[in-house]
């Protein structure tokens, strides 16, 4: 698994980073081969919509990734696992942001994206 990323769904991994001094999180979704090489999101624009012949190296929203993965026919169970991965990624970012402040309590994540 790529450092700092959690498995999201299919061959997509997610990294969540909390902005300094904020309750906002920035997301990055990337595709990886089993060998750890990155793959582009093919036939896709930055919003996850189908764009024939275009590709992007990463996506920045779960909506864009869902659009991309929906074209691959994911099951409901796989979609639930993706949501669990999003929660795990966010919790890791919160802990990482708190390490420098010695406060390891989790923040109410209901106000973030």
Image: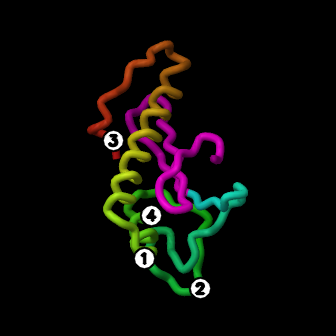
Picture coordinates of residue 2, whole percent (x, y): 65, 47
- Is residue 11 left or right of 112 when viewed as pictured? right
Give the label on residue 71, or none: 1
Name the element at disc 3: loop
Q: Which residues are magenta?
A: 1-29
**Mark positioned earlier in the residue sequence (4 or 3):** 4
Vertical arrangement, residue 74 with respect to residue 80, above or below = below
Give the residue pinned by disc 4. Answer: 65
Residue depicted at 63% across the width and 59% down the height: 32
Residue depicted at 50% across the width and 13% down the height: 102
Magenta run includes residue 19: yes
Single out the mark in the foreground, 2 or 1.
1
Contact between marks 3 and 1 (CB within 8 A): the answer is no
Give the label on residue 53, or none: 2
Residue depicted at 65% across the width and 42% down the height: 3
Picture coordinates of residue 40, whole percent (x, y): 62, 68
Contact between marks 4 and 3 (CB within 8 A): the answer is no
Contact between marks 4 and 2 (CB within 8 A): the answer is no
Picture coordinates of residue 11, whole percent (x, y): 56, 61
Contact between marks 2 and 1 (CB within 8 A): the answer is no
Residue depicted at 72% across the width and 57% down the height: 35
Name the element at disc 1: loop
Magenta run includes residue 16: yes
Single out the mark in the foreground, 3 or 1.
1
Name the element at disc 2: strand
Q: In 3D space, how far apart are the residues under numbered discs 4 and 1 (Cα atoms)?
A: 10 Å
Q: In 3D space, how far apart are the residues under numbered discs 2 and 1 (Cα atoms)?
A: 15 Å
Q: In 3D space, how far apart are the residues under numbered discs 4 and 3 (Cα atoms)?
A: 18 Å
Give the residue pinned by disc 3. Answer: 112
């Amino acid at each position: 698994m790529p450092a700092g990323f959690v498995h999201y769904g299919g061959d997509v991994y997610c990294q969540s980073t909390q902005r300094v001094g904020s309750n906002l999180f920035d997301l990055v979704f990337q595709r990886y081969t089993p060998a750890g090489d990155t793959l582009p999101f093919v036939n896709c624009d930055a919003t996850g919509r189908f764009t024939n012949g275009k590709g992007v190296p990463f996506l920045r929203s779960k909506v864009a990734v869902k659009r991309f993965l929906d074209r691959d026919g994911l099951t409901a169970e796989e979609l639930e696992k993706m949501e669990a991965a999003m929660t795990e990624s966010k919790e890791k970012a919160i802990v990482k942001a708190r390490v420098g402040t010695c406060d390891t309590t989790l923040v109410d994540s209901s106000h973030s994206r």
